[in-house]
Image (cartoon, grey):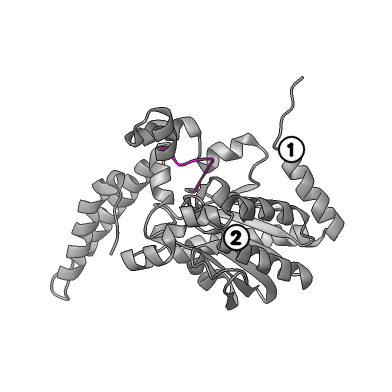
Amino acid sequence: MHHYLEFEKPLVELEQKIFELRGFSTDQVDFTAEILRLEKKAEKLRQEIFSNLTRWQVAQLARHVNRPFTLDFIAQIFTDWFEVHGDRLYRDDPALVCGFARLEGRPCAVIGHQKGRDTKEKVYRNFGMPNPEGYRKALRVMQMAEQFGLPIFTFVDTPGAFPGIGAEERGQAEAIARNLREMAALKVPIIATVTGEGGSGGALGIAVGNRVLMMQYAVYSVISPEGCAAILWKDGSQGPVAAEALKLTAEDIRQLGCVIDEVIPEPMGGAHTDHKAAAEQVRLCLRKHLADLQALSPDELLEQRYQKLRAMTIVQE
């Protein structure tokens, strides 16, 4: 079932009419011409809507319940997926999926946040918000990848790390900080892709890479628009205003010049409208950047990653 966002509602009537006409078409009654006319009208309307999105609307797209998640990208892009569970310290964390696979025949490690679509899965995946054991599991897999000389692909899609009491008691901040430090020193290529929400430290815990990519309708920010509004105005409903101030869209981040390396285009209407086409764009981008990084030695990978991080800081005297 297609889930429409508020700003997509003008499309609902048109697409419903197209669906009905297709159902009514028979050998005796042909509605092909009318269907084509309505499809062209719907396509024009879709282009108008998606060429003038506000930052708040992009944030809504990034959270779309039908948007492809990490396991969807794995199914479309990789083969021979083998998931690894547990951090060998506490338990497994379903909010972060980690394992090994092949990209066009080449072995690699794949790590990513995983959300849910129905209520049961959302609760099981903790809405894509990892606990410390999730980040420790991810680090375990990344260290295994380094041991065997495998490139690492990460997929970022989380509102943030889980802020619960248990998570804090088990060292949430330490787990993320350790990942930042260890990822900076790994001697294999790391390519991070922000596919949906890139929320604060929860995103950064798996996003230190030689290349950081961002899908067209993803967002990347130190805090959610609602969280920002709750702090600044004590009113979470001011999220649309906060979103404009945060400048969290892929185009905003690209203009900073050093945080991300490429914006991956999405199908018209967003990745949720066509998982296969969206995944193909991601696959092509991953292949291109991996080819560039494979030409570098381990020491050159470290230096490139170091310089990338240093370039994010501007010092004025």
Task: Determine the residue positioned at 59% across, 54% down.
Answer: 171
Q: What label sits on residue 311 in the rendered view? A: 1
Say which amino acid is labelled 1: Ala
Q: Residues within 10 Å of mark 1 (few under 14, many from 20)?
A: few
Residue 37, percent from left and from top: 25, 54
- Where residue 224 sits, quadrant-wise, is top left
Q: Which portion, as a residue range, is magenta?
A: 218-225
Q: What label sits on residue 71 in the rendered view? A: none
Figure check: 202 above or below 103? above
Please, what secondary structure does the residue beneath circle 1 have?
A: loop
Marks 1 and 2 sit apart, C-alpha to C-alpha, by 26 Å
Magenta residue check for 125: no
Figure check: 238 above or below 51? above
Looking at the picture, tell me which residue is in the foreground, 12 or 1.
1
Q: Residues within 10 Å of mark 2 (few under 14, many from 20)?
A: many
- Where residue 274 sits, quadrant-wise, is bottom left
Task: Determine the residue positioned at 54% across, 45% down.
Answer: 200
Looking at the picture, tell me which residue is in the foreground, 10 or 68.
68
Q: Residue furthest top?
A: 317
Say which amino acid is labelled 2: Tyr
Task: Determine the residue positioned at 81% across, 53% down.
Answer: 302
Task: Determine the residue positioned at 40% across, 36% down.
Answer: 54
Please, what secondary structure does the residue beneath circle 2 have?
A: helix
Does residue 27 appear in this view? yes
Residue 310, percent from left and from top: 75, 39
Magenta residue check for 223: yes
Residue, disc 2: 135
Left or right of residue 37: residue 159 = right
Figure check: 166 above or below 313? below
Residue 268, percent from left and from top: 42, 52
Q: Quadrant of the N terminus?
A: bottom left
